Image: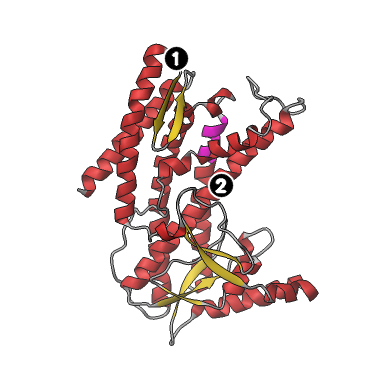
Amino acid sequence: MTLEVASNALQSSRQRLVNEYVRLARTMWLSLTPADWWNDAVTYGAAARLALLELALIGQVRRLGVSYADQTLRMVGVTPAGNVQQLVYPRVNTDPWLVAARPAESYRGEAVKNPDIRPETWPKKGDELFDEVNKWLQSALQRLQTNVWDDVERASTDATLGRYRGSKVLEYRRVLHPELSRSGSCGLCIAASDRWYSTGALLPLHANCKCGVAPAGSDYDPGFQLNSDDLKKLYAQAGGTTAAALKNVRVKTITHGELGPILMAQDARDTPNSVPGKDSDKWTTPDRKTTLQQFQRMKDRAIEFSKRYKQVSDTGKEVSFRYEGRTYRFKPSIHLRQSWAYQRALLNQVQSMLGTAA
């Protein structure tokens, strides 16, 4: 097996898993009524279900990452060794439940720009409000797609690097995947493709990045030839001034408060999608400890939310309350009972995970 075959197989497997998650998540979000998107009881119920699905996805792609690491290590004559944790959430300073709820934040962020438009039912294509309301939904679904791919890319790569470290491989390089992006590898990835990184450090990525990794050392560097072949094709296809521009891109790495190392253009000034109240110096490498801390946080939130679901269910009236520094509004809905069930399932699962880890 060659590096290209192994790398492409990994990417294909990850993409299939992501596509299935996105399909289920889209179905979930698009089943809500327009009023549900403003109802935290429903959006956080949906997010509870999707958080569990993503945690299962993270476990799967981490196993794929270890399998890929074993294949690439054997290619360079290294025997795979070391244990890799199967479930490490790839973000810090947040938790899977909060991240899973972000499509609703994106929807509301677009909708508040037009406060006079609040449909009771979804407009149909051709209706006067369709284009505007559809823009809100597409913003939510795009947030969903970006978040899950960022998580999958980081989780899988982290597991691969963990296996490399356990096998005493000290460095690795970025492997380009121009075939996975509509416009090919971006200038940022191309500019960084000649670098080696310590296996003790995560690969700097950008949003929707499709780059992989491969071991690198004085006696082996299988990613070098693969990248060289891809770069020749990219420059030939770009031609002229475009090819020259690609070669002249300069990059830098900054630290995002949740995701860690982010690849950016040298002249970029700020962190993309910054985390409110979370400075870059608060970031630490995700590990089992940070993941369990997030599970505890989700457990505490679920216990508090259970009381609020019951209040709304018992009284049939809206409940507004403060928790973790923000205001939540739980309202009656035809989806309230199902949302509460999703929340209880999340609570049961994180309690089980915490109990197993104890």
Q: Residue furthest top?
A: 315
Dot 1: what SS? loop
Q: Is residue 100 magenta?
A: no
Q: Residues within 10 Å of mark 1 (few under 14, many from 20)?
A: few
- What is the three-letter code of the residue carrying label 2? Gln
Q: Nearer the viewer, residue 54 or 274?
A: 274
In front here: 71 or 115?
115
Task: Please indicate whether residue 197 sits to the left or right of residue 88 in the image.
Answer: right
Residue highlighted by disc 1: 317
* Residue 25 is inside the magenta segment: yes
In magenta, the rendered stretch is 23-30
Q: Position of residue 302 (x, y in %)?
A: 34, 33
Does 231 sit left or right of 53 as displayed?
right
Main SS of the magenta part reads helix
- Residue farthest toward the left in the current orientation of the protein: 358
Where does the image place residue 151, in percent across and percent down from the top left? Answer: 47, 53
Disc 2 marks which residue? 145
* Nearest-to-viewer mark from 1 and 2: 1
